[in-house]
Image (tube, grey):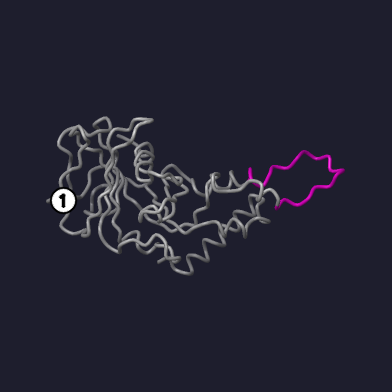
Amino acid sequence: MIKPEQCERLTRKARKTLEEYGLGVAADLLLSSSRWGIRLDVSTLDEYRRTGNSRVGGHPDLPSGMEWPVTQEGVPMTFLAQLNLVDLSPYTPNDGRGTLPERGMLYFFVGTDESASPIEHRVIFEPSSHNLIRRESEGDTALDGAPFVAHSVTVLPNLEFPTYAYIDANVLNELSPPRLENDEAEAEVSLYDRYLEFESSWNHPSTLNWGGCLDILTGSIRMPSIVPCYRSHWEKSTIIMSRRVRRS
């Protein structure tokens, strides 16, 4: 669970940042709409010094008896990521949502990335993170053959704010203080526009820093940052991850 002191620190940071964006008058409303989540920092290359660590790209560490997932055409799927749940469990929300198993591995594989088509994908839960073996696919995989560059994952807690689709612009703008009739200054930027700038900066600080609410990992449909609330959330998560990880 996220520690109370971490919640307090991140809440203070979020309120201060909202005020810096001119959203102080709406801070209480916006904070009440936020959810606790995680950030996955993938800015460090993984040199394969450990087995079973959280990793994006490269080659997976799999149980010896696990078969490599394939597409309907029999082509090996591309490995995207593995998450060791020991890394995630300290940051599970305190509100009863998004509870994850405390141990085990989550593996993410994807098939061909084609627009306007269902994306074949596999998300596999393995209860144990022991006795894993680093594996390479037999032959080229679905996404252009070449593996992604391996990056180690650092997991951090974060307060995630809703995307533009989940914010009522009218309600937000109604909180703006009234302007004087004789005020000839240029019209101020609306609170809604300010919020869009804030949300983009806060939820998307870097292409190598991903995040969202833990609900998506347990079946609910909400992830405001890397997977913004789609019905087929795993499908969208895999395609977004595949496009963001740098290749060799």
Work out whether residue 10 or residue 193 is closer to the camera in this orientation and state it: 193
The furthest residue to the left: 65
Q: Where is residue 19 in the image (x, y as percent from the top left)?
A: 64, 55
Q: Is residue 220 left or right of residue 202?
A: left
Magenta residue span: 175-194
Q: Is residue 152 left or right of residue 72?
A: right
Q: Relative to 2, does residue 242 appear above or below in the rendering? A: above
Q: Relative to 59, does residue 6 appear above or below in the rendering? A: below
Q: Residue drawn at (42%, 53%), measured in percent from left and top?
A: 39
Q: In this view, does 209 lie to the left or right of 13?
A: left
Residue type, mark 1 in image:
Ile
Quadrant of the image containing the C terminus: top left
Q: Residue drawn at (43%, 42%), measured in percent from left and top?
A: 207
Q: Is mark 1 on a helix, strand or loop?
A: strand
Q: State the residue position of label 1.
A: 133
Q: Position of residue 126 (x, y in %)?
A: 22, 55
Q: Where is residue 237 in the image (x, y as percent from the top left)?
A: 37, 43
Q: Position of residue 61 (x, y in %)?
A: 20, 50
The furthest residue to the bottom: 4
- Majority secondary structure in the magenta region: loop
- How many numbered circles does the render carry? 1
Quadrant of the image containing the N terminus: bottom left
The furthest residue to the front: 231
Q: Relative to 110, does residue 11 appear above or below in the rendering? A: below
Residue 58 shown in magenta: no
Residue 192 shown in magenta: yes
Q: Residue drawn at (28%, 50%), measured in percent from left and top?
A: 82
Dot 1 alpha-carbon crowd within 10 angstroms: few under 14, some 14 to 19, many 20 or more: some
The furthest residue to the right: 182
